[in-house]
Amino acid sequence: MIGRAPSKATRVLALSVLSVGLAATSFAAQASARAAAMAVSGPAVPVTIVTAAKSIRVTSSAPDIGALLEEEGIRLGRYDQVRPSLADPVVANGVVRVIRITKWVAIRRRTIAPPVIRRIDFALPPGKTKILARGVSGERQVEIRYSERDFEKIRARVVMQRVLRRPKARIVDEGVGEYAALEYFATRGMRKMSYVAGSAMRMVATAYTAHCYGCSGITASGYPAGHGIVAVDPHVIPLGTRLYIPGYGPAIAGDTGGAIRGNRIDLGFNSLHDAVAFGRRVITVYRLK
């Protein structure tokens, strides 16, 4: 049919014959593939497929779990899990469980509360405060990874955080005693201390400075260490108790120490020279009402 100058009709006839031949070949190949698949898969068996949303029972001749899910149009996400695994064979009356898992990452900005520095002020009445610096909140960036399993409770885990802006401290002066009354006791003697003193205790006193070895400069109660802040045994003198110590002045029980047990007290000083000069001695400590 094909010559040096075939006619139009001859060319159409040749193309038609070629198309029929290709279609027959394709049909034969598909039939052969179906026959091979049926030979591998074996007989159809009942199987139950369970997801978080539903449970279905199907009859399938799929050779493995992966083919079964594909046959039923069940698509898997990136993090989804299948039990048994996709490569395991399909067994009669078996149960295939599909676990849906979703994961995502979020970037959040969180506020950093300003630290509070409390300082004692003997010129303020008890219970009165004066704000010296209001403080400024800081900000940090947090990267959080979330995961959800079968629509259950979402789990969150912080994987990274970075400080974008450091906070500035809030500074508060707190009144702990009446300066005029304490000045009166210093000039007139201690005979009338009983009017404002709850009790008097004989204690062994030592001295410390804010810059001693291992010291942070901030006491257990949050006050900066120094003159007027003393370390006590909280079982003997509760933290926050206002005190008066002859020769030392008004004080507040604002710190603790590993060696401060029982009737022991550690007086804060602003300089090493003053602390060394005080040394170790027995003193009377008055607890103010």
Image: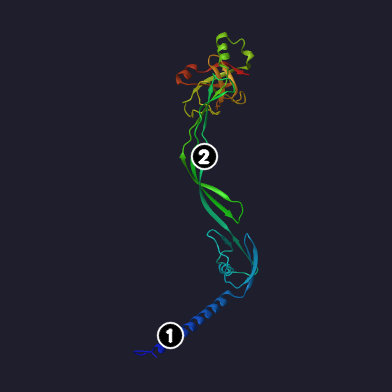
Q: Position of residue 61 (x, y in %)?
A: 60, 73
The 10 Å Cα crowd at callout 1, few under 14, some 14 to 19, many 20 or more, is: few
Q: Earlier in the sequence, mark 2 or mark 1?
A: 1
Quadrant of the rendered image containing residue 13: bottom left
Q: Is residue 136 above or below residue 271?
A: below
**Dots 2 and 1: beta carbons under 8 Å?**
no
- In the image, 100 versus 218, the foreground residue is 100
User: Disc 1 residue type?
Assistant: Leu
Report helix, strand or loop for mark 1. helix
In the picture, the quarter occupied by the C terminus is: top right
Q: Position of residue 145 (x, y in %)?
A: 52, 50
- In the image, 17 versus 67, the foreground residue is 17
The 10 Å Cα crowd at callout 2, few under 14, some 14 to 19, many 20 or more, is: some
Label 2 vs label 1: CA separation? Answer: 76 Å
In the picture, the quarter occupied by the N terminus is: bottom left
Q: How many marks?
A: 2
Q: Which mark is residue 15?
A: 1
User: Disc 2 residue type?
Assistant: Thr
Task: Name the residue at 62% across, 74% down.
Answer: 44
The colouring scheme, among rainbow, by chain, secondary structure or one colour, is: rainbow
Could you tell whether 186 is left or right of 16 in the image? right
Task: Name the residue at 47% across, 40% down.
Answer: 163
Residue holding disc 2: 111
